[in-house]
Amino acid sequence: MSGKFIVFEGVEGAGKTTQIHQTAVWLQSWCNDRTVVITREPGGTKLGQQIRQLLLEDLDSCIGNRTELLLYGADRAQHVESVIRPHLDRGDLVLCDRFTDSTVAYQGYGRGFDRSEIDRVNQLATGGLHSDLTIWLDLDVEIGLQRVLLRGKPDRMEQAKLEFHQRVRRGYQELANTYPNRIVRIDANQSEQIIQAEIQAILKQSV
Ligand code: TMP
């Protein structure tokens, strides 16, 4: 049996973490003969946790845009090789908080890298692995950033200007238009329960 690779995407504060955990609990009971795994980027491996710390927590660092892109790529390469591929080969259901579409949205649309450069980094990092399904929790960036501020001190990416986050959201919109079979949009401005019900309805058809 081959595994399934399901990715959750969205702008800051879209509610991915809550939804991915609720989805894992439900999916494990719905498919009780399969193993459900939750992981994330950046930070899905021991090395990745250190990369995550560098990328997000070190607020004084002046990380250049190229360095940032390559650090996300390095985190992904280690993650695919040591976590995602092995689980998929075992037939597991892998739920991942962010993957390659984040790099297109944040480093491509947000920072302004050409799509061809982003694709080269993603290809090198993943060896061509794509999600089977990407659930895009779409939220107005101002609402998301307000939620982030309520949680505490914003990290390095969250501190970027509003226009950066607006470009990121536009990136997700364009990705969803380009890959309608792989990326499903959910309105993340609804209640947690309704969002979760919509996710379950989608997964019942694809897992
Ligand atoms: P999060 O885990 O709380 O969503 O934070 C991850 C941050 O890293 C978020 O600001 C999005 C950003 N990011 C990128 O800019 N590019 C990437 O490729 C990935 C995976 C995340």
Image (tube, grey):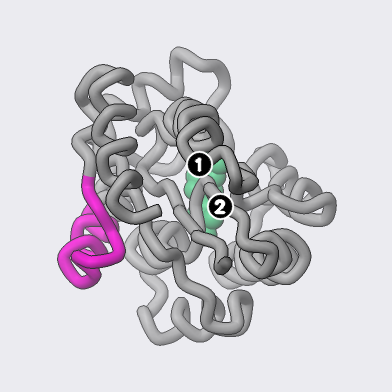
Residue at the extreme top: 150
Closer to the camera, 77 or 163? 77
* Secondary structure type for disc 2: strand
**Element class at badge 1:** loop
Q: CA distance from mark 1 to mark 2?
A: 9 Å
Residue at coordinates 36% horizontally, 79% vertically from top-left? Answer: 115
Q: Above or below — where is 84 with respect to 58?
A: below
> Is there CB contact under 8 Å for labels 1 and 2?
yes
Left or right for 119, reference 172: right
Measured along the vertical axis of the image, is residue 180 above or below residue 16? below
Q: Is residue 187 visible?
A: yes
Q: Earlier in the sequence, mark 1 or mark 2?
A: 1
How dense is the environment of label 2, judged by Cα within 10 Å: few (below 14), some, or many (20 and up)? many
Q: Nearer the viewer, residue 205 or 125?
A: 205
Task: Identify the residue at horizontal 33%, vertical 55% (top origin).
Answer: 206
Classify residue 28 by image quadrant: top right
Question: What amino acid is labelled 2 in the image?
Answer: Leu
Q: Which residues are magenta?
A: 170-185
Q: Is residue 24 left or right of residue 54?
A: left
For mark 1, what is the residue? 31
